[in-house]
Amino acid sequence: WVPGLNVVIYHGNKEAREIIKKHELFLSKADVEDMRAESAAAWVRRLPASHVLPKFHVLITTYEYADDPVVQSVQWDALVVDEGHSLKAGPGTKRFDTIKKLRSKHHVLLTGTPLQNNLRELFNLLHHLDSKKFDSL
C-alpha cells in the first residue's frame, strides 16, 4: 500500500492522451521555478529552469504508445514489460526495437509463456535485458 504513489495510465484516443500530457505527466517550468525558489534541498536549487520533472511515479501504457515521443523522452528508473515473450522474435522487429529504444536503468520482462527449447528466443530476451553482456549468440 503506497497512498502517495501517483500512477498515470497513458492510454485512450489522441484527445485523451493530449489531456494527460498537458495535466498529468510533467511539472510546468513555473512549478520547477517555484520549487527552486522555495526548497532548501540543494539538488532542487541546482535544477536548470528548463529541467522537466515528472508528476508521476508509475506510468502504465501499452506497446502501441511506447514509441510516443513523450514516452521515449523519459529516462526511466525501471521498465517493466508485460507479455515479455512478445520480444522473443528479437532485433529487427518493430516491438523489440521500439521497446529497446526506451532508456531505463532496470528492465524486467514478465511472461507466463514458456520458452520452447529455442536458444535463439532465450538469447533475444536476454539481449533485450542486457545487450552488452548478451551481444551475440
Image (cartoon, rainbow, N blue to C red):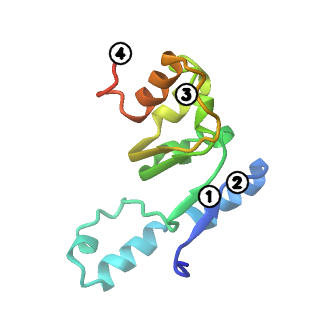
Q: Are marks 2 and 4 in contact (CB under 8 Å)?
A: no
Identify which residue is drawn at 48% across, 17% down: 119
**Residue 59 appearing in the image:** yes
Q: On the picture, is 83 further left or further right than 129?
A: right
Identify which residue is drawn at 63% across, 40% down: 83
Depth check, mark 2 against mark 4: the one in front is 4
Identify which residue is drawn at 36% across, 60% down: 51
Residue at mark 3:
96
Residue at mark 1:
21
- How far apart are the two marked residues, 2 and 4, measured between alpha carbons? 38 Å
- How far apart are the two marked residues, 2 and 1, measured between alpha carbons? 6 Å
Q: In x, y percent, where is residue 109?
A: 52, 42
Q: Secondary structure at mark 4?
A: loop
Q: On the picture, is 133 further left or further right than 65?
A: left
Residue type (three-letter) at the residue carrying disc 1: Lys
Q: Are marks 2 and 1 in contact (CB under 8 Å)?
A: yes
Bin the neighbour count of mark 3 within 10 Å (Cα to Cα): few under 14, some 14-19, many 20 and up.
Answer: many
- How far apart are the two marked residues, 1 and 4, measured between alpha carbons? 39 Å
Q: Is residue 116 above or below residue 35?
A: above
Residue type (three-letter) at the residue carrying disc 4: Ser
Q: Quadrant of the N terminus?
A: bottom right
Q: Which mark is residue 136?
A: 4
Depth check, mark 2 against mark 3: the one in front is 3
Residue type (three-letter) at the residue carrying disc 2: Arg
Residue at mark 2:
17
